[in-house]
Amino acid sequence: MAKLIKWSKLSRHRLFKLIECFCLDIEASKAAVLLRLNRNTVNRHYTLFRRLISAHQLAQLRRFVGVVEADESYFGPARLRGRPGARKRGRGTFKQPVFGIYERQGRVYTEIVPNCSARSLHPILRGKVDPASVVLTDDWRGYDGLVDVGYDKHVRINKAKSFASGRVHINGIEAFWSFTKRRLAKFNGVKKLFPLHLKECEWRYNQSLPTLKASLFSIIKSHP
């Protein structure tokens, strides 16, 4: 923490207030007004917090076990500027595909992928999910063949017929996608820092304000 105070050149009081604004998810422009700081100063600190959080999320990653939900989502504008045509959602658009894994009542992991083919998704699942886990997905062809690579407890949901049947659903990861898209909407799209915002959303998901503040202070203190 002492190194951060020296780097930031802010008083301890102002730095703590800035951390609180970040945990409250107050945009940089509003935090600058509230704390009477330069917008660039706030942006610089917010970016540092996000980089530390991203490194923390990756360092804490361990194999997912138990009941695990996997799903893909797409981020970006519904239509690119200068390209005529109807607004589209999901596959077949120019949006950025992102793959997500959710451990029931637990952690979330996201990864930006070039596409949602089996070639892209299978290696991530094999590296992040224990083969003994129950893996729940929809019926997208990118999940074809998971049983053949060791996931013999792969259960698929046909959304054309039903979104859930008892505990067979992927509502957890879909709730995370909804949370993430609502949160990012207020930033009017994030391009350069999109990977950092994804990791921040993992960190924020299902956490209370006191937990977030304690976690961020711990992350900052452990930073060399």
Image (spheres, grey):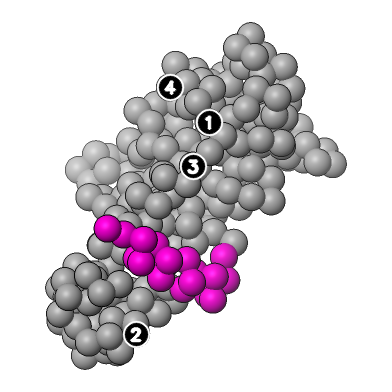
Residue found at the very far top of the displayed protein: 148
The tag earlier along the polypeptide, 3 or 1, is 3
For the residues labelled 4 and 1, the Cα–Cα distance comes to: 13 Å
The tag earlier along the polypeptide, 4 or 2, is 2
Type of the residue with mark 2: Lys
Of tags 4 and 1, which is closer to the observer?
1
Residues drawn in magenta: 207-224
Q: Nearer the viewer, residue 210 or 201?
A: 210
Labelled pair 3, 4 in contact (Cβ < 8 Å):
no
Q: Residues within 10 Å of mark 1 (few under 14, many from 20)?
A: some
Residue labelled with disc 4: 120
Q: Which circle marks residue 183 in the picture? A: none
Type of the residue with mark 1: Lys
At mark 4, the secondary structure is: helix
Residue labelled with disc 2: 17
Vertical relation: 143 (above or below) 163: above
